[in-house]
Image (cartoon, rainbow, N blue to C red):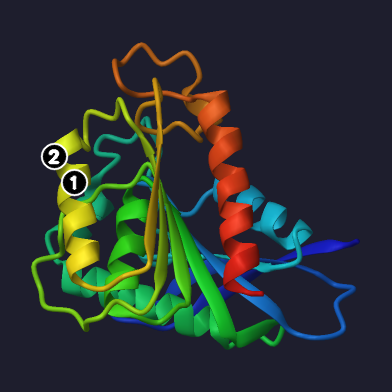
Amino acid sequence: MAIERQAIVYDGPGGPFEGVAAFDTGWSSPRPGVMIVPNVLGQKEQDNVVAERLAALGYVGFVADTYGQGKRTTRESPDPAMYMNQLNADRALLRDRLHASVAAMQALPQVDAARTAAIGYCFGGKSVIDLARAGGVLGVVAFHGIFDPPGYDYPRPIAAKLLICHGWNDPLVPPEAVTALAAELTEAGADWQLHGYGHAGHGFTDASMKGSARPGFGYDANADRRSWQAMRDFLAELFA
């Protein structure tokens, strides 16, 4: 196995954008593509590693860029959420950038364009739920995402399957938001499942948040391991 990374520059509304693809150079035929939508900070090494982990499972991992080429923040930035906030204020633009990112992934020669999915973390979790609503992939997995509806009409029934991995102690998504999403997805005819992880909070997959002193936030090894396995099972069924 030889995993390779490639920077992928692509067009879209407000672009250009720059993502990262990871794949096994030994493959002789196109593989299912799994798009990764990053958290508030945008594309970074942490996401590239996820793409490589997906490539090791037999997929093409593609880290999407929804902010724009060179537009990234860190936790030490004056306003780490500046680019996220712009898209939260214009969910239709977020939708259109997600579709541009899916198209870029599907255009890769290593990808079977008819077999694609998306996963996302935090803001990326919100994003992939929006992508499921809008269409374009077979299924999505949201890790500690945000559940507020996008404020625009979308096609129904929702065709994409959804796996929602949620830390039950997440203060950004109280129980009433969870039940509201369940009601929305049910009414929209979606095939959905929700895994709630007890004692886990927001960012439970993010190892950089180990030891967080902020209540309801931080890494949780059990929830991280269990949600990754749930994703593996979901994708195996989706692409079977």
* Kind of residue at badge 1: Thr
Q: Residue at x 50, y 33 (%)?
A: 206
Residue 155 vertical position relative to residue 229 in the rendered view, above or below: below
Residue 81 vertical position relative to residue 193 in the rendered view, above or below: above
Tags 1 and 2 in contact by the CB under 8 Å rule? Answer: yes
Residue 56, image x, y percentages: 78, 57
Q: CA distance from mark 1 to mark 2?
A: 5 Å
Foreground residue, 57 or 39? Answer: 57
Q: Is residue 74 visible?
A: yes
- Secondary-structure class at tag 1: helix
Residue 141, image x, y percentages: 45, 57
Residue 201 vertical position relative to residue 67 in the rendered view, above or below: above
Q: Is residue 80 left or right of residue 143?
A: left
Q: Which residue is mark 1?
A: 179
Residue at the farthest left position: 151
Q: Residue at x 22, y 28 (%)?
A: 171
Q: Residue at x 29, y 81 (%)?
A: 13
Foreground residue, 147 or 190? Answer: 190
Crowding at mark 2 (Cα within 10 Å: few <14, some 14-19, many 20+) = few
* Kind of residue at badge 2: Glu
Q: Is residue 14 visible?
A: no
Crowding at mark 1 (Cα within 10 Å: few <14, some 14-19, many 20+) = few
Q: Is residue 78 left or right of residue 31?
A: left
- Quarter of the image that includes the N terminus: bottom right
Q: Which residue is mark 2?
A: 176
Hey, which quadrant is residue 191 in on the image?
A: bottom left
- Quarter of the image that includes the C terminus: bottom right
- Secondary-structure class at tag 2: helix
Q: Is residue 178 left or right of residue 49?
A: left
Q: Residue at x 26, y 69 (%)?
A: 94
Q: Is residue 162 left or right of residue 111?
A: left
Residue 82, image x, y percentages: 23, 48
